[in-house]
Image: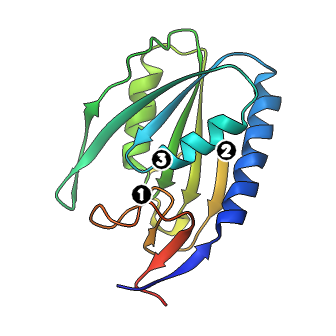
């Protein structure tokens, strides 16, 4: 299936640098626990933490509120973080905020663990699909309701390796 470039590698790189600068300004050199949401956010997290100058502790979490293609409304943690986030500055990093359900439930779960602060950073946001509002503190790009692939985003496990974000099925 074909796809077209939607957000270029250069656009992503420039935006990641801007986000890192903003994060550094907000945390003034304080230590930050960065939690990447697997699998989709791994490339974004890797690029982002290389640009952040503040000290970082990195961990990953994997969760789902879906069985097949249907949302269950219940969050299931598939891989939990190992780091204790109590009294720590935490940034949860997601690839895309779509309906908002999974991220809302993840934020609730992490908030219950007593962090000093909990911020949300997302590479992409699709407002047209939002059902559960989430405050995105650090946003890469707001996009229309298109099926996007690349830069960690997949279709059936494929296309994650693309250095840009493409629209699946468009050429």
Left or right of 64, for residue 8: right
Left or right of 94, for residue 81: left
Residue at coordinates 70% horizontally, 49% vertically from top-left?
16
Q: Label 3 vs label 2: CA separation? A: 14 Å
Label 3 sits on a secondary structure element that is loop
The quadrant holding residue 84 is top left
Left or right of 102, for residue 43: right
Q: Label 2 vs label 1: CA separation? A: 17 Å
- Disc 3: CA contacts within 10 A as few (<14), some (14-19) or many (>=20): many
Front residue (pair 77, 42): 42
- Give the quadrant of the N terminus: bottom left
Q: Is residue 71 visible?
A: yes
Q: What percent of the width, then of the height, locates residue 154?
A: 37, 62
Q: Is residue 23 above or below residue 126?
A: above
Sequence-earlier tag: 2 or 1: 1
Left or right of 121, for residue 162: left
Q: Is residue 135 visible?
A: no
The nearer-to-camera label among 3 and 2 is 3
Front residue (pair 78, 157): 157
Q: Can you identify the residue that label 1 sits on?
A: 99
Q: Is residue 157 above or below residue 2?
A: above
Sequence-earlier tag: 3 or 1: 3
Residue at coordinates 44% horizontally, 15% vertically from top-left?
83
Q: What percent of the width, then of the height, locates residue 91?
A: 58, 31
Q: Can you identify the residue that label 2 sits on?
A: 138
Q: Label 3 vs label 1: CA separation? A: 16 Å
Q: Can you identify the residue that label 3 sits on?
A: 41
Front residue (pair 111, 95): 95
Counting every numbered tag in the picture gives 3
């Amino acid at each position: 299936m074909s796809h077209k470039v939607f957000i270029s590698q250069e656009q992503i790189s420039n935006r990641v640098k801007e986000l890192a600068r903003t994060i550094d300004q907000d945390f003034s050199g304080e230590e930050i626990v960065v939690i990447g949401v697997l699998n989709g956010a791994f490339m974004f997290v890797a690029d982002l933490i290389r640009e952040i100058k503040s000290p970082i502790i990195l961990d990953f979490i994997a969760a789902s509120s879906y069985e097949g293609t249907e949302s269950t409304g219940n969050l299931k943690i598939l891989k939990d973080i190992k780091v204790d986030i109590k009294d720590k500055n935490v940034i949860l990093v997601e690839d895309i905020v779509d309906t908002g359900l999974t991220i809302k439930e993840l934020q609730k779960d992490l908030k219950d663990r007593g962090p000093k602060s909990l911020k949300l950073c997302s590479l992409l946001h699709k407002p047209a699909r939002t059902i559960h509002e989430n405050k995105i503190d650090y946003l890469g790009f707001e996009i229309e309701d298109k099926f996007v692939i690349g830069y960690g985003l997949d279709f059936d496990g494929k296309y994650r390796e693309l250095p840009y974000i493409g629209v699946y099925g468009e050429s």
